[in-house]
């Protein structure tokens, strides 16, 4: 009971602080402080409610227990991270995105291909491609190669659609300008089309970071060697040691956010000129 | 006449590429399945002619890659020829997945819209919740799916609901992000106009913000329903291949029934396409009535 | 001296649209001499922009011929005979002002030193010295348009085609840029084709004013200006200026009566 009371008071207090902060002038500090306080509140709520209602840690382990588990299983978590993220997701992401990028550039030269491939690309981007996982596991074996293959086909179409859209994004005056200069195809591509396409390309790259991680993890549910984040999650769920599952999910969340954040940082550096990046 | 021409202008290239894809599929089926056919012939001590080889690659029971017509036959067999109450009917499995998808989609949309309304009206909520909503999109949420299923099973919740919860989880993010954008779509001039009429927050919401958000709303619904279907399929994996399209995928991969996997996959694709198209139809009708689209 | 640079004979251009054919240009005949400043004026839809685009080989005529320096527009384009300035500045946001002006020079294969020399030179011409490291979006609209003119001047095109370059600017900035443009024209001795909506602008700038009328787009009147080549803004107060403006207005009205 005391836990629940504490949690409610803490929640109220934090919310009051946040309302205060939000009403005040917006600075760099409040922009970070407000969501951080909110995040801490959520964790305290979780911890307090689990203890207060004495929920079995088998069903929902409190954050403190997860943190402890995280700290004591670092070697396993690292091994899984390397297997799933570095080998599976990252290599698949790299291959898939480059293949889509090159395809987009090839397709862009032909209006016929563009009109044919774009609707199909848009259609496939909405399909549950993750279902291809069992087939690819069958073709490429249990190890990371099949996970990379799943990632490749998952990221290919979103990346293709975004890049093709980007290559069409230049404005008409700029296109005509290149024509009055009698610029060659490659000059036009390098000096106008690619730079103008960058915001779209990075949009695709950012979407694909999440897809890559999901693809690599879920593909492991269909068969994997005895390491990897997806493997660990499905086996530990079976053994009901949920603190380990949550620790893996934490790793996945950190990896996902870091991956996305890295792409967002590169985007900021490359497309500094775009209105959305200029403030 | 011009209408027909413009139809072909649009559909022609798509059909062409589809035909090429099917041809590639056949070619790949021959190439991938040839090894097994040759192997079998060698063990039987016979030599295969080219036409025998091709026909064998198209009719194996567990081919590496089934030919399109094999998948089509399987789909026909498991939809039209089976009673829909049968456990072997693909329609039955599809319905199980669909019901979880729709339930989760409705929950997710409702939750997403509510959250977006809160975010647009409360600065504190905007500043504290929005960054987390965006961060959470970078997290592979599907990884949580098995745990949600197992935990809910342990407390006695099973069947439709756990899958719907995963679907809800996946579909609510696009709705929040899209709706926040949509409810903020009215520009300063339109909002100032409302102020000059001394309209209340409530009136501004119903007369300006909500109508302006409709194009964004439908765009995010399309993403949400596709995500919801993925959620339902993945949600069916950890329950041990009982029912649903996800279960068909898993069972197929256990027993190497590639034809079954492909037919479940095509079925899922058709379902996704139909759902997105349905929302597209509702979108067009609504926006047309609201005068936002011709 | 009076050497013909651009010559159009029986030029027509028809666009095929869903609502049937649109006659953007019909039976256009016009000669432009070297060193002329020619304005094209008329209501929207009269084909003045289309005509400029045909000269630059951005549109292909349906019938009739255009020659530029005795060549077809396509050949002239390959020889980089044009500097073109569009309605919007169209600067690349990812390049600095200097980088934008360097763009045509890079494409045309000028050496590094030559590029730097020319960029400094044209920046001085349009009075943007010291702005070469700035990005376009850090400059005002008028400065952006000046930069886009500098970009068109950077290489040795002897024809400058300008499509309503000052249309989006306010009148005070516009007057200033008009005066600058005349000075530039005097210094560089280029042939200029200039599309505008504004009667005072056309009269103030031009040695030859081409009045056009819509549906189908054709030439209603060609006025050779009697104003001296060397002029200042004060000239707009003179009777001579008013007379020419009056004739332009008459031409525009006659074109509308055709409707």
Image (cartoon, helix red, strand yellow):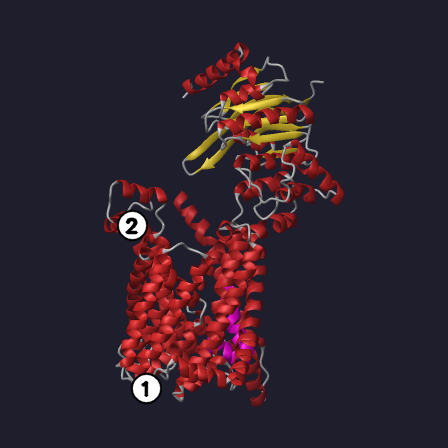
Residue C121: x and y, percent? 70, 35
SS class, disc 2: helix
Q: Is residue B159 visible?
A: no
The x, y position of residue C84, in whole percent, is 60, 34
Q: Quadrant of the N terminus of chain A?
A: bottom left
**B71 vs A58, nearest the viewer:** A58
Q: Which mark is residue C189?
A: none
- What residue sits right under mark 1 in the picture? A56
Secondary structure beneath disc 1?
loop
Q: Chain of mark 2?
A: B
Mark 2 to mark 1: distance in Å?
46 Å
Check residue B211 in the rendering and tell me which mark sits there, or answer none. Answer: 2
The chain carrying label 1 is: A
Most foreground residue, B121 or C210: B121
Tell me where residue A177 appears, x and y as whole percent: 59, 40
Please identify the dominant SS of the magenta region: helix
- Closest to the observer, A128 or C85: C85
Is label 2 or label 1 in front?
1
Going by the image, does A37 lie left or right of A105? left
Relative to A70, say whether B26 is above or below.
above
Q: Report the side of A250 relative to C66 (left or right).
A: left
C41 and A103: which is toward the camera: C41
Q: Position of residue B7 (x, y in %)?
A: 41, 49
Q: Magenta stretch: residue B149 in it?
A: no
Q: Residues within 10 Å of mark 2 (few under 14, many from 20)?
A: some
Range shown magenta: A133-157
Q: Quadrant of residue B223?
A: bottom left
In percent of the image, x 69 and y 18: which residue is there? C2
User: Is B203 situated above or below C175?
Assistant: below
| B84 relative position to A178: left or right | left
Viewed as shown, does residue C62 lie left or right of C22?
right
Residue at 40% x, 54% y is A25
């Amino acid at each position: 009971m005391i836990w629940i009371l504490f949690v409610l008071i803490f929640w109220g207090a934090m919310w009051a602080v946040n309302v205060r902060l939000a009403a005040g002038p917006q600075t760099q500090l409040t922009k970070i402080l407000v969501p951080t306080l909110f995040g801490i509140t959520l964790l305290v709520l979780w911890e307090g409610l689990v203890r207060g209602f004495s929920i079995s840690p088998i069903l929902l382990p409190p954050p403190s227990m997860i943190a402890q588990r995280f700290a004591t299983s670092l070697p396993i978590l690292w091994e899984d991270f390397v297997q799933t993220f570095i080998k599976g997701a990252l290599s698949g992401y790299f291959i898939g995105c480059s293949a889509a990028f090159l395809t987009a550039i090839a397709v862009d030269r032909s209006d016929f291909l563009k009109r044919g491939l774009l609707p199909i690309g848009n259609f496939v981007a909405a399909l549950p491609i993750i279902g291809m996982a069992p087939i690819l596991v069958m073709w490429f074996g249990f190890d990371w190669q099949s996970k990379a293959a799943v990632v490749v086909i998952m990221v290919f179409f979103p990346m293709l659609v975004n890049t093709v859209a980007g290559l069409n994004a230049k404005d008409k005056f700029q296109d005509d300008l290149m024509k009055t200069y009698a610029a060659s195809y490659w000059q036009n591509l390098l000096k106008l089309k690619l730079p103008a396409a960058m915001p779209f390309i990075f949009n695709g790259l950012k979407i694909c970071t999440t897809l890559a991680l999901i693809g690599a993890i879920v593909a492991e549910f269909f068969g994997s060697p005895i390491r990897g984040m997806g493997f660990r999650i499905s086996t530990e769920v079976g053994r009901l040691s949920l603190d380990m599952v949550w620790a893996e999910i934490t790793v996945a969340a950190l990896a996902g956010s870091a991956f996305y954040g890295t792409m967002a940082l590169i985007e900021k550096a490359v497309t500094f000129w775009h209105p959305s990046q200029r403030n | 006449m011009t209408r027909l021409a413009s139809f072909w202008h649009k559909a022609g290239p798509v059909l062409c590429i589809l035909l090429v894809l099917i041809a590639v599929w056949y070619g790949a089926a021959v190439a991938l399945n040839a090894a097994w056919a040759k192997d079998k012939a060698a063990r039987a001590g016979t030599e295969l002619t080219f036409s025998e080889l091709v026909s064998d690659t198209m009719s194996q029971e567990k081919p590496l890659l089934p030919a399109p017509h094999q998948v089509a036959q399987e789909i026909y067999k498991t939809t039209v020829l089976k009673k829909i109450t049968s456990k072997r009917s693909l329609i039955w499995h599809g319905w199980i997945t669909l019901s979880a998808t729709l339930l989760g989609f409705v929950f997710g949309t409702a939750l997403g819209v509510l959250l977006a309304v809160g975010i647009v009206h409360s600065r504190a909520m905007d500043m504290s919740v929005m960054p987390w909503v965006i961060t959470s999109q970078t997290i592979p949420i599907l990884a949580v799916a098995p745990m949600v299923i197992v935990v809910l099973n342990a407390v006695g919740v099973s069947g439709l609901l756990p899958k719907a919860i995963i679907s809800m989880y996946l579909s609510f993010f696009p709705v929040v992000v899209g709706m926040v954008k949509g409810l903020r779509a009215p520009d300063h001039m339109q909002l100032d106009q409302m102020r000059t009429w001394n309209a209340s927050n409530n009136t501004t919401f119903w007369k300006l913000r909500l109508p302006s958000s409709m194009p964004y709303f439908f765009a995010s619904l399309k993403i949400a329903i596709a995500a919801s279907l993925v959620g339902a399929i993945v949600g069916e994996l950890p329950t041990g291949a009982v029912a649903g399209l996800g279960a068909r995928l898993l069972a197929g991969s256990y027993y190497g029934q590639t034809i079954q996997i492909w037919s479940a996959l095509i079925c899922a694709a058709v379902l996704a396409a139909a759902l997105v198209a349905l929302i597209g139809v509702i979108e067009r009708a609504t926006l047309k009535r609201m005068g936002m689209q011709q | 001296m009076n050497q013909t640079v651009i010559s159009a004979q029986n030029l027509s251009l028809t666009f095929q649209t869903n609502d049937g054919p649109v006659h953007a240009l019909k039976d256009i005949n016009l000669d432009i001499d070297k060193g002329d400043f020619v304005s094209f004026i008329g209501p929207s839809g009269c084909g003045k922009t289309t005509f400029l685009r045909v000269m630059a080989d951005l549109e292909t005529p349906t019938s009739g011929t255009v020659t530029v320096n005795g060549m077809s527009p396509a050949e002239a384009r390959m020889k980089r005979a044009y500097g073109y300035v569009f309605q919007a500045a169209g600067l690349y946001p990812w390049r600095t002002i200097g980088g934008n002006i360097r763009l045509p020079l890079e494409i045309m294969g000028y050496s590094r030193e030559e590029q730097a020399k020319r960029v400094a030179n044209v920046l001085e011409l349009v009075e943007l010295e010291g702005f070469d490291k700035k990005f376009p979006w850090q400059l005002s609209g008028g400065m952006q348009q000046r930069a886009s003119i500098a970009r068109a001047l950077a290489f040795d095109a002897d024809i400058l085609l300008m499509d309503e370059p000052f249309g989006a600017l306010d009148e005070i900035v516009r007057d200033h840029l008009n005066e600058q443009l005349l000075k530039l024209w005097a210094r560089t001795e280029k042939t200029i084709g200039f599309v505008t909506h504004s009667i005072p602008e056309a009269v103030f700038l031009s040695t030859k004013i081409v009045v056009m009328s819509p549906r189908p787009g054709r030439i209603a009147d060609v006025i050779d200006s009697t104003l001296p080549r060397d002029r200042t803004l004060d000239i707009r107060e003179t009777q001579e200026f008013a007379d020419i403006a009056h004739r332009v207005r008459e031409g525009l009205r006659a074109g509308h009566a055709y409707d």
